[in-house]
Image (cartoon, rainbow, N blue to C red):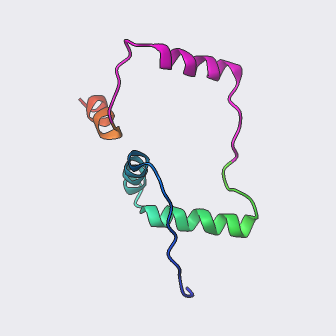
Amino acid sequence: MSASVIVQARVNPDIKENASIVLQSIGMSLSDAIRITLTAIAEEKSFPVKFRTPREETLLAIKEARENKSAKRYSDLNALMEDLNA
């Protein structure tokens, strides 16, 4: 591998933490994921993930979930996983 440079980005701390947990569970670091993503963009000349507008049914489900005040909420992924594994 040739010389490398440091890439910095501003990200919400919760997003960084949750992404790091997911990546760690599959044996990757945040740096690995960024390096893989940037390599794919450079090689494919496009973003490796296709963003799509959700279908009307999906948008309605999202709206209902957000408006459901009685739904159980979790502060982070760890809390959700603890509840699921209980």
Residue most extreme to the bottom: 2
Q: Residue at x 52, y 70 (%)?
A: 7
- Relative placement, left or right, of 56 versus 16 is right
Of residue 81 and residue 13, the one placed in the foreground of this image is 13
- Residue 60 painted magenta: yes
Question: In the image, residue 40 lies at what x, y percent?
Answer: 66, 65
Query: On screen, 39 above or below 63?
Result: below
- For the image shown, how many numbered marks are present on the structure? 0
Q: Residue furthest left?
A: 86
* Viewer-closest of 39 and 11: 11
- Tell me if residue 56 comes above or below residue 28 in the rendering: above
Question: Which residue is at a point 38% across and 16% down the rendered structure image?
Answer: 71
3 versus 6 height, above or below: below
Residue 30: percent from left, percent from top: 44, 61
Give the side of residue 32 with respect to residue 74, left or right: right
- Which residue does the image show at 37% across and 12% down from the upper left? 70
Which residues are drawn in magenta?
50-75
Q: Indicate left or right for 28 with 45 as reference.
A: left
Relative to residue 20, is residue 82 depicted above or below?
above
Residue 78 screen position, x and y as percent:
30, 40
The magenta stretch spans residue 76: no
